[in-house]
Amino acid sequence: MKAAEGAIVDARIPPILPRIPIQSDKLVRPDWVSSKPRSSRLLWLDKNENLDSELQKVTQRVLASLDPTVLCTYPDSGPLCRKLAKAMTVDPEMLVLTAGSDGAIRSTFEAFVAEGDTVVHTVPTFAMYPVYCQIFGANAIGVEYQRTESGPQLDIERLLWLVENKKPKLVCLPNPDSPTGTTIADRDMERLLVATAVTGSILLVDEAYYPFYPKSVVGLIKYYPNLIVARTFAKAWGLAGLRIGCAVGSKETILFLHKIRPMYEVNTVAVAFLEKMLDHEVDVLESVNRLNEGKRYF
Amino acid sequence: MLGFRTLNGHGNFLHVSFGSYAPTVFASLESLVLFRQDFGDACLAGYSRFSSTTTEEFVPIVDRIRKVVNDQTNKKVSL
């Protein structure tokens, strides 16, 4: 074989192969080269962002107040962790910063799911659950929402049966779920917490839409060390582009997520911005009210 | 408001089923707003999804949908 100058071509060189789950043809991601930017002439209501112009006035002021050195320095996330923990009324050790709730979900898979482990998730749900199941070689079991007159409905008895009989390593439950917008009743959530605690399954509750849906299970972490809550600042806080969120759980559980975190889990701009933005929770709640009013108007 | 079936979800988005008006509504909104027109999943088939926004931002969208509905209703009446 004639190779181009400088190239190494040798039939004896074995092909480069990733981990077995990554070799699967079924693992396909959206085209990362030919995506087209959205038109600025249109109103963007396709990705569940918060484009409230009143909230943008606040975020623009916060952005303008940042020290320019945030661009040339590595992050120190300690002060933000402590401030965020205080705002969420948890201990700082119960929290790890992540790249949105997606980062919390991925870290949970990375820390707890080995090849062949069973993972239960709803269908349809956030697109990355089935993707992470494939990436980490999990045996994914989907619980499909049923179509009813009042909208999609989850068969909670089926979910509980799967927990009790399949003893999954991980149960993924966004609350509210997306794209369905459905929530789990308090009593059913408690049944799931008990069932997963008994089987030693991690229950990952994604509260990405908090406080659009103001109920939270963060207060139950002290009773359930198997509970991890994912949060993001992309929705209500209008910070989708910042890619910052967190995972909250018992100190012992979150320690595992800290063990696998990158050297810098989030960037300095995000850390500095959020630290200041946390002082504007009232503005965020007002924005949530404006968006809920708009929803009712529609 | 316009009589379409909606879902009372808890996220920052809403679902609406435009039924037989869907093709005309989609065409009329094409130059105004990006939204998810439909879902492949049976539990949400036929529903469109809009992210929540302020009433002020929703007004021109609802107005345009209302115009589609009125135009089609008038067309049916004149037939």
Image (cartoon, grey):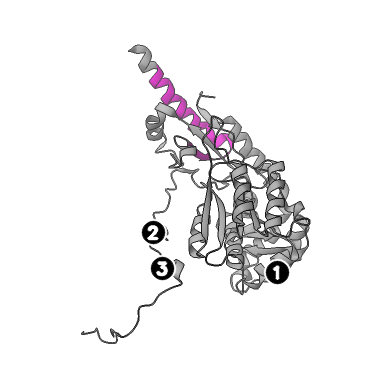
Q: Is residue A69 above or below residue A95?
A: below
Mark 1 to mark 3: distance in Å?
31 Å
Give the amino acid at mark 2: Asp
Circles 1, 3 touching at the beta carbon (< 8 Å) = no
Give the residue at x 61% y 53%: A165
**Which quarter of the rendering shows the C terminus of chain A?**
top right
* Element class at badge 1: helix
Q: Report which residue position mark 2 lands on.
A: A31
Q: Earlier in the sequence, mark 1 or mark 3?
A: 3
Give, as a three-letter code, the residue at label 1: Leu
* Badge 1 and badge 3 both on one subunit: yes
Picture coordinates of residue B21 (x, y %)? 41, 27
Judge depth for marks 1 and 2 and give the one in front. 1
Q: Which residue is mark 1?
A: A255
Q: In front: B27, or B36?
A: B36
Q: Position of residue A254 (x, y in %)?
A: 70, 65
